[in-house]
Image (cartoon, rainbow, N blue to C red):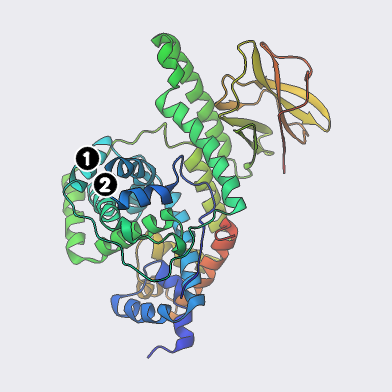
Amino acid sequence: MVNAIVQLAGPQRRGPDLEELVAKVAIGDQDAFGRLYDAVAGPVLGLVRRVLRDPAQSEEVTQEVMLEIWRTAARFRPDRGAAMAWVMTMAHRRAVDRVRSAQAATDREQRAAASARMPAYDEVVEQVESRIEREQVRRCLRGLTELQRESVTLAYYRGCTYREVAELLGVPLGTVKTRLRDGLIRLRDCLGVGE
Amino acid sequence: MTTVAELHTLTGAYATHALPEVERSAFEEHLAICPSCAREVAEFSATVARLGLAETVVPAPELKQRVLAQAATVRQLAPTVEEEDRPAAVRSRRGRMLGRLALAASVLLAVTAGGLAVQQHQDAQRARSETAAVRLQSAAVSSLLTAPDARTATTSSGGGVGTVVWSQSRDQAAFVAGSLPKLAADHVYQLWYNDAGTMRAAGLLPASSGALVLTGRIDGAVGVGVTVEPSGGSAHPSGAPVMLLPFS
C-alpha cells in the first residue's frame, strides 16, 4: 500500500487551498469549481500548449481536463500527492493522448494552416510568480547532463514515448529509461520536491 | 520480456507518460505491489508538475464560461470507497515558506493585473497612474528576475510577507511586499540596504502590497531591512527593523 505524501514545494499557486477546493468540488459545489478553475486553468493551458502547440486544440484539451476534474474530484486522494500534481498529471496525460492519436496530427496541421486565432494572453499578469517558477525550473534543467535533459524534455514537453526519444537521440532504449529516471531524481532534489 | 529489475527503472518513463499502452499496464500492475516504486512515481509526478507550472499562461476569459456552463451538465463520479483512509497531506516547512513567497508574488500580481481594490474609492485618473506605476515597477522586478544570478529570499512579519530579489551582477535589488500590516496615514514602510550594520536609505514602499526596485546599488550591502518611518521617510532608521533579509 502506498503511503506517499508528496508535496510539490516551490511557488505554489495563489490563494486558496487546492485540496480543500477539490473536496468541495467533489460534493458538487460549482462556486468552488470556479475558484479551482481560476487557480489551475493557467498552468493546465500552459502545459498543454507547450506539448500541443496549437492554441485552439490546447483550449479544447484544457476544457476536457477541467471537466475531468469536475467529474472525478471525488476520486482525488490527498494522501497520494498534492492537488496541483493530480491536475497536472491529468493535463499531461490528456495532452500526450492527443499527440499520439493519429487524427490529432491531421487536425493540428489543418488548424494551424486555417486559423491564426490566438487566445488573448494578458501580458501583464504573466509576471513575477511565473518568472520565479520558470527561472528555478530552467536553473534545475541546466543542472542535468545533456542526455538527461534531452530525455526529460522530449518525453515531457513533446510527449514522446521513450522509444521515440531513443530514436531521436540515437541511444539504446535502456539508456533512455535510466536517463529519464536519474534526470528526474536530480530535478526532484534540485526543485526540493517531497522534502 | 521485462524483468522485475528493469521494471523498477520505468518510474521516470511512467511519470512522464512515455510508456506505450501495453508497457504502461504492465508497470501499473507492478506499482500495486512495489511501494518504493509508487513513492518514486508520486515524487516524479510532483517534479514534472513543476515543469508544467513553469509554462503557466493566462487563459482567455471565454474559456472559463464554456467550462462552467458545460460542467453544469456533467454528472460527477462517486468516490471509490476504500477501507483505510489516511490523514490529509501536511504541507512541509519549505512548502509553507515558498507558499509565502508565492503569496507575496501573487499579491503583486493581483495588484498588477486587477488594480488595487482601494482605487475604487479614488478618482479614475489617479488609479490609472498608480496602476501604471505598479506595472512599471513590476516590469522592472521581472526584468531583474531574468538575471542569470537572480536570487530571492522571503520572510514574514505580522501576517505580511516580504521578498527580496537581487542580482549581484546587476548590482541591483528589489522588494516585493505582500499584505504588510496597514500603517497609520502618517507612516510609511521604508527600505534600507544593510551595509554590515549601517542602514542606507533605499526607498519608500508605495503601499502595503506591491513591488519596488530599490534606490541605489547593492554595493557590498549584506542585505535589506524594512522599518516603519514617518511619512516622507527618514535619513536613519528611527526604530528596529520589522524585517531583515540577508542576501544569502
- Residue extending furthest front? B83
Q: Position of residue A96 (x, y in %)?
A: 30, 63
- Residue extending furthest right? B197
- Residue bearing the label numbered 1: A117
Q: Is residue A12 above or below residue A167?
A: above
Going 69% across and 33% down the picture, which residue do you hit? Answer: B171
- What kind of residue is marked 2? Pro
For marks 2 and 1, give the CA distance. 8 Å
| Mark 2 touches mark 1? (CB < 8 Å) | yes
Q: Secondary structure at mark 2?
A: helix
Q: Which mark is residue B181?
A: none
- Residue bearing the label numbered 2: A55
Q: Is residue A118 visible?
A: no
Position of residue B70 in the picture relative to residue B36 (left or right): left
Going 33% across and 43% down the picture, which residue do you hit? Answer: A32
Q: Is residue B198 above or below residue A181?
A: above
Disc 2 and disc 1 on one polypeptide chain? yes
Position of residue A187 in the picture relative to residue A83 (left or right): right
The chain under label 2 reads A
**Residue B149 position by quadrant:** top right
Q: Position of residue B61 (x, y in %)?
A: 27, 35
Residue nearer the viewer, B45 or B99: B99
Local packing at callout 2 (Cα closer than 10 Å; few below 14, some 14-19, many 20+) is many
**Residue A73 position by quadrant:** bottom left
Residue nearer the viewer, B87 or B137: B87
Going 53% across and 58% down the picture, which residue do you hit? Answer: A141
Residue nearer the viewer, B139 or B247: B247
- What kind of residue is marked 1? Arg
Q: Position of residue B127 (x, y in %)?
A: 44, 14
The chain under label 1 reads A
Q: Earlier in the sequence, mark 2 or mark 1?
A: 2
